Amino acid sequence: MKTLSFLPIVTILLITSCEKKLTIDLPADTDRPVLNVLMTENNPLKVRFSLSGRLAGGQSFKEVTGAETRLYENDTFKELLKTKVIEGKTYYISNTVALKDKKYKVTAAMPGIKLVEGSDVIPDISTIEINNQSVTESNGDSYKLKFNFLLKNKSKEKQYYRFRILYEENKSGNTATKTAFYIRPVNTTDIFGSGNSEKKAWFIEKGQPAGETIFYSFTADFKPNSKKMLIEVSLLTETSYKYLKSVSKADDSEDSPFSEKVIIHSNIQNGLGIVGGLSYQEFPIPSK
């Protein structure tokens, strides 16, 4: 009989984090340390440290108390992270904010286990350029809105992206709220998992080469009252890209009995999880 296990996965809704559980196989030994943080530019680190195990649905993973969690910037020690309980879960929070083009390493130590660590950099979002962004309306059956734009990779290396398209509305109290469309890519092999399904976020299929400009197009079946719309581009390190793409693939195949097992990418030494970096920027779509 196949044994199913759950690994705590930290994913992002941009600058916030939430914990997600996916069903994957774990090695025979349980209680492996799991270190998770996705670092965003100009924000403190919010680190989750727990232990893996075989759990029934709805159960929580064993939290690690009293761990010494350290942060290094460009291999220089910065600080001991302090614990904070958020919505019933314990996180290790930094005073340091992550800066572009710097490498950050997080280590966690506790009695009885080897030192757990992972590291990544914060990519420079200014190395991308968005041009010719537009939105067109349709009253046909195939879509309500169509979004087009050109993205140029101005860096000297290939880059990895995630796309969302947002609309902004003023709700009670004149507070502006941004909401992501459910979108689908249009006739392209450049987007991972292209097809008829709708998602709030899409990843490119492979790294966009240095200096290259690619045309991207998405449609949405919903037409909001708001005229203020934006293209959100997240620039991911290769580590973050592999992790988030594998999570997306696992989401797509979770309910299918015919799908192959998905291995969630990890860069943690002596444990599981991810220390990954990303930056993002919103580009307004001119209204007509």
Image (tube, grey):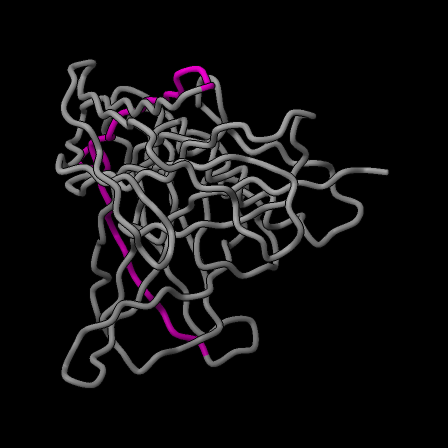
Q: Is residue 119 above or below residue 259?
A: above
- The answer to which image quadrant residue 29 occupies is top right
Q: Nearer the viewer, residue 157 or 84?
A: 84
Q: Quadrant of residue 54?
A: top right
Span highlighted in magenta in the image: 112-138
Q: Quadrant of the C terminus?
A: bottom left
Q: Residue furthest bottom?
A: 172
Q: Based on the displayed image, in which of its 4 quarters is residue 82 positioned?
A: top left
195 magenta-colored: no
State the quadrant of the N terminus: top right
- Residue at (17%, 30%) from the top-left corner? 100
Decide whether residue 116 is among the magenta residues. yes
Residue at point 74% right, 51% down? 256
Q: In the figure, is residue 9 to the left or right of 260?
A: left
Q: Give above or below for 55 relative to 222.
A: above
Please provide percent x and percent y for residue 87.
Answer: 35, 59
In the depicted structure, whether residue 37 falls above or below residue 73: below
Left/right placement of residue 235 relative to residue 243 reads left
Q: Which residue is at 37% across, 37% downward?
A: 65
Who is closer to the viewer here, 287 or 28? 28
Q: Residue at x 27, y 78 (%)?
A: 226
Question: Picture coordinates of residue 232 (x, y %)?
Answer: 29, 53
In this image, 241 relative to 76: left or right?
A: right
| Residue ranking furthest to the right | 1
Q: In front here: 103 or 20?
A: 20
Question: Can residue 164 be seen from the camera position used here?
Answer: yes
Q: Position of residue 250 (x, y in %)?
A: 60, 44
